[in-house]
Each structure stands twice: as structure tokens, then as C-alpha cells.
Amino acid sequence: MVTFGLKVALFLGAFAFMEGFAWFTHKYVMHGFGWVWHRSHHEPRHGAFELNDLFAVVFAAPAIVAIYFGTSGHPWLLPIGLGITAYGAVYFIFHDGMVHQRFKVPLGKSAYWKRLIQAHRIHHAVHTKEGAVSFGFLLARPIRELKAKLKARGVQA
Ligand SMILES: [Zn+2]
Ligand SMILES: [Zn+2]
């Protein structure tokens, strides 16, 4: 029996897990063997899309599978699929909207959003596979810590 409380816990758990998963993937896959796709995101974009957008398609797959099975016999998978989807939506509004301004979205004015926007801009201060800092999206280290790290690597933020 999947109670309402369990559904909420699974939804929030999936959402929180995705930030950790996104951090890990960004640091070790995108700035690793996935650089062939991610590189396009650290260079000026030509046209509406970049090769890096393919990662969004890959990340959507487990959510689609979880929602499919969640609505056909495995109800506990539905809140997980929805949690992954919700993370994707918040990530998209924050990363592609607020930071990279690929579409119009009100900039987050709270200290939390301002710090996250700045942290991701600091990530983009490095245009190479190696040497970048701040791989998280909805969680980030304090700005002065990130700037100090970059400075130690000889990059001006
Ligand atoms: Zn990156
Ligand atoms: Zn970015």
C-alpha cells in the first residue's frame, strides 16, 4: 500500500537525489567522456540548440519509464517519475532561463537564487574540460570560496 506520506517522501527524495545525480554527472561525465557533448555548452551557441541539449533527452528517459510503470501496476514509481520531472523543470527554468537566458523568465531576486546564478556563471568562467568549479545547480558553495578556488587555478571570475 503506497500511502500519501510515502508518495510525498518518494517525490521529494527523487527531487533531492536528482541534484546529487546532476552534480555527479556534470563533474564526472560531462567534464569527462561526455565533454564531446558538453563542450558546446562552454562555447558560444550557434543557433537555437547545442549538442549539450541531448543530455536533457537522456535524463528524461528514466522519468518517462518511471511514469509509464507508475501508471501501470507499480504506483510507487509514479511519485519518483514526477520528482525527476519536477527537478528537470526547475533545473530548466533556473539553468536555461535565469542563467543563460535562452527564454524570458523573471530572474530570481532572493539571496538564494542570486547566489546560485552567480555560482553557475563562475562555473562558466572556465571554458575547458579541466579546471572548472561549481558543478551543482540548486546547491552551491559560497561565492567567495568558489572565487578563491578559481583564483588559485589562475582564472579571473
Ligand atoms: Zn560544465
Ligand atoms: Zn550552464
Image: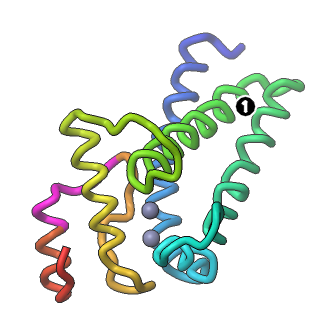
- Seen in the picture, residue 55 relative to 156 is either above or below; the reply is above
> Which residue is identified by label 1?
77
Residue 92 point in image, percent of width and height: 53, 45
Q: Is residue 78 rendered to the left or right of residue 128?
A: right
Q: Nearer the viewer, residue 92 or 82?
A: 92
- Which residues fall within the magenta stretch? 139-146
Q: Quadrant of the C terminus?
A: bottom left
Q: In the orientation shown, which residue stands out farthest toward the right?
A: 72
Residue 21 point in image, percent of width and height: 51, 55
Amino acid carrying label 1: it is Leu
Q: Quadrant of ligand 1?
A: bottom left
Q: Residue at x 40, y 46 (%)?
A: 98
Q: Is mark 1 within 8 Å of ligand 2?
A: no
Residue 151 point in image, percent of width and height: 13, 81
Q: Residue at x 48, y 66 (%)?
A: 26
Q: Residue at x 79, y 28 (%)?
A: 70
Where, by quadrant of the figure, is residue 74 drawn? top right
Magenta span has 142? yes
Residue 33 point in image, percent of width and height: 59, 83
Q: Is residue 78 rendered to the left or right of residue 104?
A: right
Task: Count the labels in the image.
Answer: 1
Q: Nearer the viewer, residue 134 or 49?
A: 49
Per the image, label 1 sits on a secondary structure element best described as helix
Where, by quadrant of the figure, is residue 85 drawn? top right
Q: Is residue 137 rendered to the left or right of residue 4?
A: left
Q: Nearer the viewer, residue 86 or 71?
A: 86
Q: Residue at x 33, y 77 (%)?
A: 132
